[in-house]
Amino acid sequence: MQERNYNADDCIDNPKSVFTVLTPKEKEFLKQNYTCAFYKKGEIIFKEGDKPLGLMILAEGKVKIFKEGVGGREQIVRMAKPVGFIGYRALFAEEHHTATAVAIEDCVSCIVDKESVFRVMRSNAELSMSIIQSFASELGFSHDRTVTLTQKHIRGRLAESLIFLKDTYGYEDDNLTIKIYLSREDVANLSNMTTSNAIRTLSTFAQEGVISIDGRKIRILDLTKLERISELG
Amino acid sequence: MQERNYNADDCIDNPKSVFTVLTPKEKEFLKQNYTCAFYKKGEIIFKEGDKPLGLMILAEGKVKIFKEGVGGREQIVRMAKPVGFIGYRALFAEEHHTATAVAIEDCVSCIVDKESVFRVMRSNAELSMSIIQSFASELGFSHDRTVTLTQKHIRGRLAESLIFLKDTYGYEDDNLTIKIYLSREDVANLSNMTTSNAIRTLSTFAQEGVISIDGRKIRILDLTKLERISELG
DNA sequence: ATTTTTGTGTGTTATTCAGCATAATAAGAT
DNA sequence: ATCTTATTATGCTGAATAACACACAAAAAT
């Protein structure tokens, strides 16, 4: 893999990470207590039932986190991006993982061991506060999703998912293409529908001029219309 | 209301509350910085869009927390019991409320003002840790619910909801009757189905001898069977 | 006590969407 | 290069469940 020479300290110094609240000394301490892992596209980072080993920070790449439901049907509950935590829910709940994480692209992840994280949290209240805020936001997101996925119709669910992907990963340089390339199956598993219906509905959106499709590249041509479809349900 | 004479300090000294990790001095501080509120059955405690004023501790009574979805359809996302927080998600996310809380029974709630809570959290890392653990568990629950409500069939969803209510509120002295009395509509809003279907499916369960119904009293006669229905989907 | 409202129960119809089949294409593997 | 497998695409059918209509009971208001 080409990013073998990734400088892992970057993710702790990254201004977008929650670690900005730490003192230089605390950051130094964390830097001395983590290891890095590299994952190829499609690789499993952790599985439902695994015990969390530490706090994983996604330094590079994109990750889907999903649960297996009825008949093995996947439901994606979160999409992670750098620099964000993965697997932190189980760690802080003192549980085994209740979801599986798979690399959507080649990934780099830094793991700070549990004891070191907890030690810094006890020494610096602001870190805990930041983590609490992250959890609170994430819980709000999860509640929103529950309502959306149960109540909206297929078109609304798909529209909302596309907007969510755009908000999470942003656009490519053309300001149109959503900066993540998912299989139709993943789009379906994110939106609570069958793959067939994801394909069908994406085609319909394209026919209506709301988006354009080029393989896995999805361009949002009419965001207003997409938002309207999402709101209508 | 008969519990006007409720001693509000109880909820901070309650051994089941997260405040057990506090020092006597910190508890004393909190006791000097809270007020109490009484709500009649059916009353709104807070509404979607309201700004959270402090940390609300449900001292007595039962509360449903729901979101309004497509066409005003309610989805219950949480059921609170004493001694637990309510409205804490919005408080810690620094957002306005994204859900509405309504008293299922007459309730007593203690509100510790935001600044005081934050001050104690900064002085005692264990409180933050406990709150983080609560959030992490709650998020896991929310993910579980998302999968259940989207993937299981009506019977499975209802069965799971009944088990959830039993686990949350326990049994009456007969060891059969679920210790909460919800309208059919609330059961439906908890289980993502229409009221008609909640009524129908409850009747079917009763015919099958899994439960027995007496108005809003629901007795679980065959928990194993109910669990099996829940697992099958 | 009587009216009004709210909640419960049941049957019928309409709609959405999952499930399945099949084909065409693309991507990997040998 | 060719075989194999995964992904994308489209059509058809049936099942699940929402929506609606209506009757009746219970609770609340007058």
Image (cartoon, coloured by chain):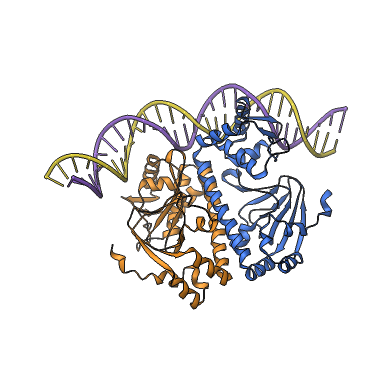
Chain colours: A blue, B orange, C yellow, D purple
Q: Position of residue B19 (x, y in %)?
A: 49, 70
Query: In which quarter of the view is residue B58 placed?
Result: bottom left
Q: Position of residue C22 (x, y in %)?
A: 66, 24
Q: Does the image show residue B178?
A: yes
Q: Position of residue B177 (x, y in %)?
A: 36, 57
Q: Nearer the viewer, residue A197 or B1?
A: B1
Which residue corresponds to the image point at 84% horizontal and 48% vertical from the top-left? A2
* Number of on-image labels: 0
Q: Does residue B177 appear left or right of residue A16 in this picture? A: left
Q: Nearer the viewer, residue B169 or A11?
A: A11
Task: Report the residue that reaches farthest toward the front.
Answer: B115
The answer to whether B48 is drawn above or below residue B80 in the figure is: above
Q: Does the image show residue A1?
A: no
Q: Nearer the viewer, residue B15 or B12?
A: B12
Q: Nearer the viewer, residue A56 or A15?
A: A15
Q: Does residue A2 appear left or right of residue A190 in this picture? A: right
Q: Position of residue B111 (x, y in %)?
A: 43, 64
Query: In which quarter of the view is residue B57 placed?
Result: bottom left
Task: Report the residue that reaches farthest toward the bottom.
Answer: B24
Which residue corresponds to the image point at 68% horizontal and 56% vertical from the top-left? A17
Q: Does residue A31 appear left or right of residue A169 in this picture? A: right
The answer to whether C27 is drawn above or below residue B2 in the figure is: above
Q: Does residue B166 appear left or right of residue B123 in this picture? A: left
Which residue corresponds to the image point at 57% horizontal and 62% vertical from the top-left? B132
